[in-house]
């Protein structure tokens, strides 16, 4: 995980492993959707996901730990 502090907020980036399961992919996307902005980039070195948490706005905290409340399932399979 990489963290960049910018003028607008905090940007977190993570490399996605090529063998990421569907269940883990869904967990990752759910956690990222809690950010102010998020995205996915494909590079020649693999896939990267990023999330940006803007500086405090209307009482919203800027802590990157606020994205960590979504837990991975015990079992890799998720119900449909």
Image (cartoon, helix red, strand yellow):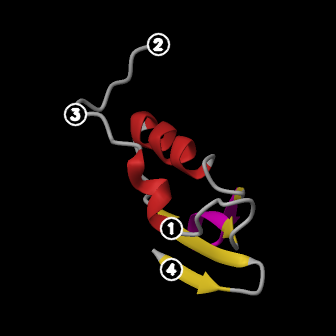
- The answer for how far apart the CA atoms under marks 2 and 4 are is 32 Å
Q: Single out the mark in the foreground, 4 or 1.
A: 1
Across and down, in percent, residue 57 comes to 74, 64
* Upstream in sequence: badge 4 or badge 3: 4
* Upstream in sequence: badge 2 or badge 4: 4
* Upstream in sequence: badge 1 or badge 3: 1
Vertical placement of 61 versus 32: above or below? below
**Closest to the observer: 41 or 6?**
6
* Upstream in sequence: badge 1 or badge 2: 1
Residue 80 disc label: 2
Residue that label 4 marks: 2
Q: Single out the mark in the foreground, 1 or 2.
A: 1
- The answer for how far apart the CA atoms under marks 1 and 2 are is 29 Å
- The answer for how far apart the CA atoms under marks 4 and 1 are is 11 Å
**Closest to the observer: 3 or 42?**
3
Q: Point out the stretch of residues depicted in magenta.
A: 39-52
Vertical placement of 16 versus 30: above or below? below
* Upstream in sequence: badge 3 or badge 2: 3
- The answer for how far apart the CA atoms under marks 4 and 3 are is 26 Å
Vertical placement of 2 versus 20: above or below? below
Across and down, in percent, residue 48 comes to 59, 65
Residue lying farthest top?
80
Residue that label 1 marks: 64
The answer to whether the residue labelled 1 contacts the one labelled 2, judged by CB atoms less than 8 Å apart, is no
Residue lying farthest front?
59
For image coordinates 52% across by 48% down, the residue present is 31
- Dot 4 lies on which element? strand
């Amino acid at each position: 995980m990489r963290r960049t502090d910018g003028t607008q907020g905090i940007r977190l980036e993570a490399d996605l492993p090529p063998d990421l399961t569907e269940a883990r992919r869904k967990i990752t996307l759910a956690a990222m959707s809690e950010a102010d902005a998020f995205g996915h980039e494909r590079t020649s070195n693999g896939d990267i996901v990023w999330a940006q948490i803007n500086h405090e706005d209307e009482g919203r905290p800027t802590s990157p730990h606020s994205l960590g409340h979504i837990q991975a399932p015990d079992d890799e399979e998720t119900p449909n």
